[in-house]
Amino acid sequence: MRMILPLLHVQSSRAFMAINEFTYSGIPAEAEALRAEVREFLAHTLADYPPALRAQSWMGFDASFSKALGAKGWLGMALPREYGGTQAGFFARYVVSEELLAAGAPVSAHWIADRQSGPLINKFGTHAQRDRYSPAICRGESYFCIGMSEPGSGSDLASIRSTAVRDGEGWRVNGQKVWTTNAHHSHYMIALLRTGDKQTARHEGMSQFIVDLRLPGITVRPIRDLAGGEHFNEVFFDDVYLADDALIGSEGKGWEQVTAELAFERSGPERFLSSMALIKTMIDAIGTQPDALQAAEVGRLAARLATLRNMSLAVTAQLASGGQPAWAASCVKDLGNAFEQDIPELAQRLLDIEPRQHGGSDHAQVLAYLTQMAPSFSLRGGTREILRGIIARGLGLR
């Protein structure tokens, strides 16, 4: 009994910490007030947008749509006005993002820049960097990709081998990044590179740089996915020269900065709304008279969706207050990816409709696309193994 009581105390403390991390946070009224305007805009702008394209959602690229959002003031909402933002805050951005994703809007062009590159530059960058990059991000005219994963490293960012070595007043970069979303469309990459001795501790000696992808020595090679798209890329650096002002934040502090950045990447509604187009076509196909199994399973989906949304909002509240909820954001992504990946399989159990890439109903086409894309949901932004390691550390279990 004496041995069991301390264990129970530890477990209850961890449980309390986990519950406290996900304290419910409603959306403030001023942010919620945006929702009706965003819905009206989307209903008009995407009136003839087919379900097969809506299924691509935040992987769908449309530069003119991104510029239209910028003109409405719906990009850079968490950034200061002096750099082109609106200072509307994280919750306002959440409302806009939620409506865009629920509608299946093509947001890929601006998404990474708005979600994480802009906030990262605002938090760690110099005044000159903010002044140079942020206004174009807010206008929906400047696209960023994230250079983290590498061959042989994947989500284990501490094992990266690409280097940035001092060369006069700048840096010389060599190496390779892989699975880089939208690199073939992007103007810039924020790259995590090794600047210190490889013999240092795993999480030390790394720095972040803003890399202009038009520089000599850079090669971008798209990777075709199962659905026939080219969203992911390999990026090669062959003696690429960067000016000294390409460094973001402090040299050697890349790991701490990346940890903060990944909270933006892993906690948003895109981590559980990627399959919304399929939920909609599935419910439409089921109709107003579901059988008992269909009613029960759609109800379970709704309950899981509501829970994930509340967890995501709790992380948004922490970000809004200046926190760094790395492990809580990892929980949202891990559970959200499982939810997204379950939907294509569930759709095939509930309806006798086969996926069809060409022809067939809207539901058959959406099902085909998301069945092929769903395996990637738990790869982008960090694999399950990496996420669960972060969660375990956050709970003091390792």
Image (spheres, rainbow, N blue to C red):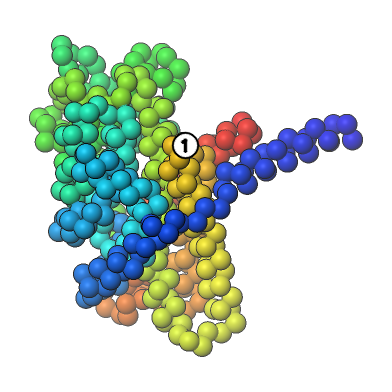
Callout 1: few (<14), some (14-19), or many (20+) C-alpha neighbours within 10 Å? few
Secondary structure beneath label 1: loop
Where does label 1 land, which residue? 323
Q: Is residue 288 above or below residue 225?
A: below
Give the residue displayed 52% in from the left and 36% down from the top: 390
Q: Mark 1 is on which residue type?
A: Gly
Q: Nearer the viewer, residue 281 or 75?
A: 75
Q: How many numbered callouts? A: 1
**Is residue 363 visible in this depiction of the protein?**
yes
Give the residue displayed 52% in from the left and 63% down from the top: 306
Q: Is residue 314 left or right of residue 74?
A: right
Q: In x, y percent, where is residue 38?
A: 30, 65
Q: In x, y percent, where is residue 169?
A: 15, 14
Q: Quadrant of residue 78?
A: top left
Q: Check the picture and name the quadrant holding the N terminus.
A: top right
Q: Is residue 279 left or right of residue 49?
A: right
**Is residue 154 visible in this depiction of the protein?**
no
Q: Is residue 269 left or right of residue 391?
A: left
Q: In x, y percent, where is residue 309?
A: 49, 58
